[in-house]
Amino acid sequence: VSISRLKLNQLFFESLLIIQGFLGLFILISLISFSPQDPGWNSQTFSNPIIEEEFGISNIVGAWGAYLSDFLFSFVGYMAYLIPYWLLWPLLRHFILFRRPIQFSQMYSGLIGIRILGWSLVLVSSSTLLSLFIEPGFSYLPQDTGGLIGSAVSRYTLEPLSFVGSCLLFICLGLVGLTL
């Protein structure tokens, strides 16, 4: 493989990391500046240029950030803060901590699939555990602490497994997800 081909792969990989970093920062800022009064996908307020000035969107990244943060908080609750971490960690690890050249063509696609499965298990199990441990009504989020996923999964597992069985199951799934 020629040197120019390796350099091109490195530039492509670093460009993808920069785009991933932008998305991670955008999501993090939108989550931090979330306001329940902003228009969102599950609110009665819809955003258009005329109404936007009337309601004054308080999300720092604008209407897109308001809709995105409302969507993420509604589906996974407080675990939405894991998504920017997943997006920003590879960028920080590559550019700041290790600075080793990693070619995009050398990444194993099966390993990426296993990591996505692991993070999905962590996300679902953590949302469900939050939904189990924290009583409804103690958060400012649209769908409480665990979001729609956490409340739906906990609702279906509480009756057959009880509280203790559900907690053990989702702690186990979370640890399996972290291992993967």
Image (cartoon, rainbow, N blue to C red):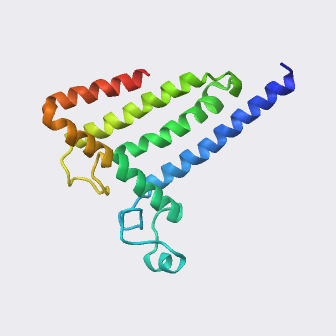
Can I make out residue 91 in this image? yes
Q: Residue furthest top?
A: 1
The x and y percentages for residue 47 are: 48, 72
The vertical placement of 7 against 135, above or below, is above
> Looking at this view, is 175 or 95 the one in front?
175
The vertical placement of 47 against 72, above or below, is below
The vertical placement of 105 against 52, above or below, is above
Quadrant location, the C terminus: top left
- Residue at x 70% of width, y 25% of height: 105
- Residue at x 45% of width, y 29% of height: 117
- Residue at x 47% of width, y 78% of height: 51
Quadrant location, the N terminus: top right
The vertical placement of 128 against 10, above or below, is below
> Looking at this view, is 30 or 170 the one in front?
170
The x and y percentages for residue 89 are: 54, 34
Picture quadrant of residue 10: top right
Tag count in the figure? Answer: 0
The x and y percentages for residue 70 are: 40, 57
Q: Is residue 178 left or right of residue 26?
A: left
